[in-house]
Image (cartoon, rainbow, N blue to C red):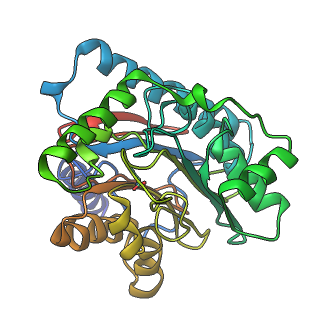
Amino acid sequence: MILRNSNILLLSAVCVLCISSCDNSNKPGYQKSDNMNNTTRKAEYAIVIHGGAGTILKTNMTEEREQQYQKALDDALMIGKAILEDGGSSEDAVVETIKYMENSPLFNAGRGAVFTSEGKNELDASIMRGSDLEAGAVGGLQTIKNPITAARAVMDSSDHVFLVGEGAEAFAKLNGLEQVDPGYFYTENRYKSLQRIQEREKEVGMHITDMADSKYGTVGAVALDKHGNICAGTSTGGMTNKSFGRIGDSPVIGAGTYANNNTCGVSCTGHGEFFIRYAVAYDVSAMMQYAGKSLEDAANEIVNKKLMDVGGSGGLIALDKYGNITMPFNSEGMYRGYVTDTEKFIGIYKED
Ligand code: ASP
């Protein structure tokens, strides 16, 4: 009997070893395995971030630039981690982490925003709280330093969800948010991207809002705090050469951002028009809620099947109520990373 028990123990140990060595969690798009049968929390707290998806190839990157991105992602994650570790809310973690990325010229959000066809910077952001489905969003801001703080103010201090243009600016000012001169958002790289696109536009004789030349860099964060609350946020300058007041998916609740404590939190990056039409962020939650899919399967289905089939390039970051994390993308790369109470990961390329 004792012998049989020890045989069973040995067999179980071999199975566990085999399962962990067959784990796909390090493959692109499968960075963290997910298991809906696992009803216990995998992480006490977690935060996952992205800094945009697109044609991000090692061959196009200098070592110095790569290090700058690695450091910026790491710094951003550490800001969120400190808040969550301390028992702070997922909202604070998301806002402070995104604020840091908005203040960096590396990302297409806040300071490093891309230019419109008129040579302006028009910023969009959104935030959603999974505990009560409250949300706030802003579009077309030109003088608010940190659009994510304006989105949060809409969520916390207004009866509305989505404010745009002059009204959104007025609301942000009324709420005492920091204002800057529009020149604050000028960066030479982004301006050169606009010039390149507009030259090409003349050559081909049609309007282009080029993802490849916009250098990407929309930012997003999704956090799960110690109290089990999920929050998701996204901030962007949109797409280079956008015109006629174009607003992408980033501030659209259900498209670029979604959070529900019962399912997951999601922040997207990519060609916004596709993400709006496919209600990408909500689709992940809906597939979990109505089709019983795992976080990873739901996210993979929308990014690598539905969007892929129609040429909608980009990716998303998401986490569920157990602390499972997934970061699929169908482009060459995506600036991304996560940290939990036990793990940390930062990646840029597919092979990371
Ligand atoms: N999704 C953003 C937009 O379409 C762009 C991006 O993620 O890079 O505005």
Residue sitting at 32 percent across and 55 percent down? 315
Q: In this rendering, would 155 be left or right of 348? A: right
Judged left or right of residue 264, residue 24 is left
Vertical relation: 314 (above or below) 303: above
- Residue 320 appears in the picture as rendered: yes
Nearest the eye: 60 or 2: 60
Q: Nearer the viewer, residue 121 or 17?
A: 121
Give coordinates of residue 331: x percent, y percent. 21, 50
Residue reaching furthest bottom? 290
Q: Is residue 12 above or below residue 331?
A: below
Image quadrant holding the C terminus, namely top left
Residue 340 relative to residue 106: left or right: right
Q: Residue at x 49, y 57 (%)?
A: 250
Q: Quadrant of residue 181?
A: top right
Indicate the quadrant containing the N terminus: top left, top right, bottom left or bottom right: bottom left
Vertical placement of residue 317 versus 104, above or below: below
Q: At which x and y percent is residue 39?
A: 51, 68
